[in-house]
Image (cartoon, grey):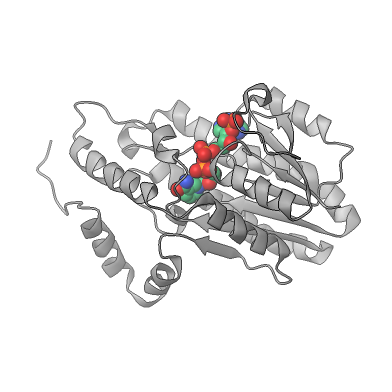
Amino acid sequence: MNTALVTGATSGIGQAVAEVLIARGYRVIGTSRNTSSVADPIPGVEYRDLDLTVPESIKAFVDGIADIEVDVLINNAGESQCGPLEELPIEAVTRLFQLNVFGAIELTQAVLPGMRERGSGKIVMIGSMLASFPLAYRSSYAATKAAIKGFATAARYELKPFGIDITTVEPGSIATGLSARRTKYCGPHSPYLRDFTTVISQLDAKEAVGITAERVALTVLEAIEDKKTLPIYAVGSNAPAVFLAKRLLPRSVLEAFTARAYGLPSKRAAH
Ligand SMILES: NC(=O)c1ccc[n+]([C@@H]2O[C@H](COP(=O)([O-])OP(=O)(O)OC[C@H]3O[C@@H](n4cnc5c(N)ncnc54)[C@H](OP(=O)(O)O)[C@@H]3O)[C@@H](O)[C@H]2O)c1
């Protein structure tokens, strides 16, 4: 039986991935910051504690899986952060990179030696379409998702000769309730407040009518089981049409279109 490790398996996409993998016959190790309070445990999933922002927690978790042959790693756990670049507290940006990037890289490094020795393995980074289509007030988040994709896309060349596939799944807007958990940094008197509110309310509305986490989980399964793993799998938010537009349209046109679609002005009076 193949063993899969899914970070952040207690809600949204991670929970749906764990469920799909159990149904597919995998042994699934799922993580949570607090396994004693998992609201809706999936039968068969082995829950383990892991807080990717706490170095001691990562070390204890990695030590705890040392004897397990991990065949599949899904780096899913993440925080959704928003705010004008000017006002993002550097501590918050640091936490975001620790969770969305460095923690995932540390786990990847922990499972790679075993995969290399066995000559097989699959690693999936859960990125975001915001890495391919960055948006105002999502700079830190888009940067973490671009970073994780960069690690994966570059390492494909290193890992392929050892029989290991690494890829990125880029979800668009997915109805997981993530909007309610999004961390927001925009002061009440911020010169950006109006545009920030316009953009984030549109994002929240898109998330509410987004595709399901289960649909994303099927794409993750495809990424794991494809004979020829692609570098990127995008799902949701009309991904095929949007990526086609990116290939066909000049960058300046795409940028102007995005700004207009989110109600962003091209100029504001000095403030
Ligand atoms: N929803 C979307 O529209 C969307 C779109 C694009 C990409 N994504 C990405 O997809 C992934 C999952 O998103 P989601 O919408 O399913 O989010 P979610 O429902 O909020 O789930 C996040 C998961 O991450 C875990 N987690 C949170 N903080 C953690 C920490 N410090 N250490 C370890 N685990 C932590 C949570 O587990 P515990 O609370 O149990 O610890 C939870 O299971 C994220 O990487 C997100 O950026 C989501």
The extreme left residue here reads 269
Q: Is residue 164 left or right of residue 205?
A: right
Q: Is residue 206 left or right of residue 151?
A: left
Q: Vertical placement of 190 versus 241: above or below? A: above
Q: Nearer the viewer, residue 228 or 1?
A: 1
Q: Position of residue 7 (x, y in %)?
A: 65, 40
- Disc tally is 0
Q: Position of residue 2 (x, y in %)?
A: 83, 52
User: Residue drawn 34% across and 39% down?
Assistant: 85
Q: Is residue 129 visible?
A: yes
Q: Vertical placement of 122 versus 181: above or below? A: below
Instruction: Give the quadrant of the C terminus.
Output: top left
User: Residue drawn 84% across and 48% down?
Assistant: 113
Q: Quadrant of residue 35?
A: top right
Q: Is residue 52 left or right of residue 269?
A: right
Q: Quadrant of residue 77?
A: top right
Q: Position of residue 219 (x, y in %)?
A: 59, 61
Q: Nearer the viewer, residue 42 or 227?
A: 42
Q: Is residue 179 left or right of residue 152?
A: left
Ligand 1 quarter of the rendering: top right
User: Residue drawn 39% across and 45% down?
Assistant: 139
Q: Position of residue 251 (x, y in %)?
A: 33, 68
Q: Is residue 136 visible?
A: no
